[in-house]
Image: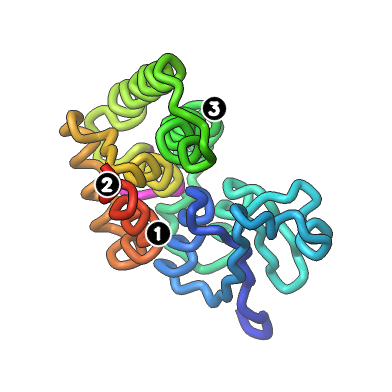
Amino acid sequence: MAGRQAVKAYLDLLSQPCRALLIFLKHNKIPHTVELIALRKGQQKTPEFTKLNPMQKVPVLDDNGFILTESDAILKYLATTYNVPDHWYPKLPEKRARVDEYTAWHHMNTRIHAATVFLQEVIFPMMGQPKNPVKFEKALADLDGTLDMLENMFLKRQAFLCGDDISLADLLAVCELMQPLCSGRDVLKDRPKLLSWRSRVQSALSDSFDEAHSVVYQLREKFTAKL
């Protein structure tokens, strides 16, 4: 895209959608720069960032002055604007609809349930709040139901969530399901079908996957060292 400057991504890599965006940019070799926004330090609440995104959330994309928020919208914008392989967000209406179907479901299922486990087990104790056993067990049960749906509705007998190749659906899902690993909890360990799926996703993404998840691995080491 001649004449365009590199896109700028505002990210906190402890955020699952931010990692998904960084992986997509790196893997598809989209020219980009990154400005880290530390949510734990409240940097998203500064006047400068609030002007950029009044919702005070990450990720945010600046593409030559076009500002976009919300990871789902950002990823689909990049997939349709830049020269990336069609499998990420297919042009064929039926295939694209499958990706849209998953991403519409994702926010109130995979995302919220995996994030709740992470909050209950990692973030709340770090803030001095004891883990609530009742709420934690409910969070695990809710996530278990979501994993059942991933296996039985989306994955079924195909290699990836929306077909035979990786898509934005797999990228968003895998980043969420990696989040509980911050405490050493692998939520897929007793699910061979989903473990195989995760291995295929990691293989498809090569180095960009582990690079983006280095913060998860570091936090896991610190958390498990305290046990």
Q: Secondary structure at mark 2?
A: helix
Disc 3 to disc 1, C-alpha distance:
25 Å
> Which one is earlier in the sequence, the residue at label 3 or at label 1?
3
- 139, above or below 2, in the image: above
Q: Tag 2 or tag 3, which sits nearer the N-term?
A: 3
* Disc 3 secondary structure class: helix
- In-front residue for pair 220/157: 220
Q: Is residue 155 above or below residue 81?
A: above
Question: Residue placed at 37% from the left, 18% from the top?
Answer: 137
- The residue to which callout 3 is attached is 108
Residue at position x 29%, y 33% from top?
187
- For the C terminus, the quadrant is top left
* Residue 110 figure quarter: top left
Read off the residue under disc 1: 215
Residue nearest the viewer, comparing 71 with 122: 122
Q: Which residues are magenta?
A: 162-168
- Tag in front: 3 or 1: 1
Disc 3 residue type (three-letter)? Met
Q: Is residue 205 above or below residue 142?
A: below
Within 10 angstroms of label 3, few (less than 14), some, or many (20 or more) residues?
few
Q: Position of residue 113 (x, y in %)?
A: 46, 28
